[in-house]
Amino acid sequence: MTMKEIKIAVLPGDGIGPEIVAQAVKAVDAVAAKFDYKVTYTHAKVGAAAIDEVGNPYPDSTHEVCMAADAVLFGAIGDPRFDNNPEAKVRPEQGLLAMRKKLGLFANLRPVNTFASLLHRSPLRYDLVEGADFICIRELTGGMYFGRPQGRSEDGNTAYDTCVYSREEIERICRLGFEYAAKRRGKLTVVDKANVLATSRLWRETAKAMEKDYPNVEVEYMFVDNVAMKIIQQPRHFDVIVTENMFGDILTDEASVISGSLGMLPSASVGSEVALFEPIHGSYPQAAGKNIANPLGTILSAAMMLRYSFDMAEEADAVEAAVEAVLDAGYRTGDIMQDGCTPVSCSAMGSLVAERV
């Protein structure tokens, strides 16, 4: 029998990206050895690393690597050399936008859940966050961030942005929401501001028309301000949240504090070509090369990759269980350190997880 093979494009990126991605690769290798399949990795440059080499934050050569792969594992983008230079013609972050556009990534998925051994780190009360487990699905390519016209008046005293959505764009993202809800606990929350915004009224109208195709999914419609409160007051209320670009940008950052550390949270961006998996945090340049970053968000992103790109639920479960086991054993990177626990480096944390897969 031919051994199953999966092809992964590896884009370490900037800052701590190379260090954390290396730990995720360890976990994937451990799973491959345990479940007997072959992994082929192809590395490529993106962000400041690509600008330094070829002057483009997302070069064609990197895009070709991504398109030839079954999934993309990505670290982080960003470099203070560009942040502090207002005259920079090219910036690393432009690579991320170009990558999303060229790969057709129209949806960002962020799971929000808690680990029993880290509940004390959440800014919310233990009894509120224990058992919280939901996923936010954010539309990535439409809305206020991409709508035109956008700009300033000639005298500079008036500025304007335009929020635009088509029915097709809304159907595409809502379909993803319905499908994820059907695979999870069967509840979908559609978030809008339909009492004020015309685009939100189209969102609600479109989602309602789709309900008949998913009879086993319970759908609720909530205004974005209500959801912002409820995520804090009753995070266990939610299963799958789907919403437009700007609302999703804000709500996912708000929800990310529930776990107690940005370093713990994975994400996925999916679309028409290939899916991309990355931790939600940035490049953390102050920690680059020091072997102190928390790689668990990246390792959990690799678990999402196994689950959603390769339909390897058992393998994904093994990685997630290994992360939980390492935390339960008291191993901690600096960002989640607590009294009585054992401090470990980024690379040591990666090895500890791989050993437990």
Image (cartoon, rainbow, N blue to C red):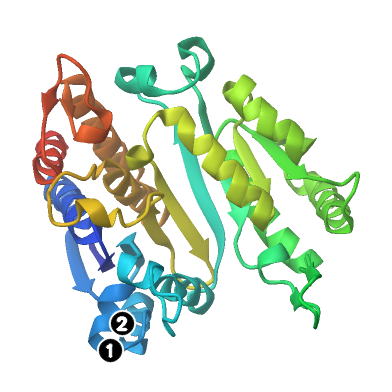
Q: Is residue 192 left or right of residue 89?
A: right
Q: Residues within 10 Å of mark 2 (few under 14, many from 20)?
A: some
- Identify the image quadrant of the N terminus: bottom left
Task: Tell me the tag on residue 80.
Answer: none
Q: Specify the amino acid type for callout 2.
A: Ile
* Residue bearing the label numbered 1: 54
Picture coordinates of residue 3, whole percent (x, y): 17, 62
Q: In terms of secondary structure, where does tag 2 sit?
A: helix
Q: Nearer the viewer, residue 109 or 8?
A: 109
Q: Nearer the viewer, residue 130 or 42?
A: 130
- When the figure is inspected, residue 255 is found, relative to residue 301, above or below; the finding is above
Tell me the distance, in whole angstroms, between the alpha carbons under discs 1 and 2: 5 Å
Q: Quadrant of residue 44?
A: bottom left
Task: Tell me the tag on residue 51.
Answer: 2
Q: Specify the amino acid type for callout 1.
A: Val
Tell me, yes or no, whether the two marked residues, 1 and 2, touch with CB atoms within 8 Å.
Answer: yes
- Identify the image quadrant of the C terminus: top left
- When the figure is inspected, residue 154 is found, relative to residue 345, above or below; the finding is below
Q: Residues within 10 Å of mark 1 (few under 14, many from 20)?
A: few
Q: In terms of secondary structure, where does tag 1 sit?
A: helix
Residue furthest top in the image = 127
At x 34% / y 38%, what residue is drawn?
Answer: 264
Q: Quadrant of residue 175?
A: bottom right
At x 19% / y 34%, what residue is drawn?
Answer: 333
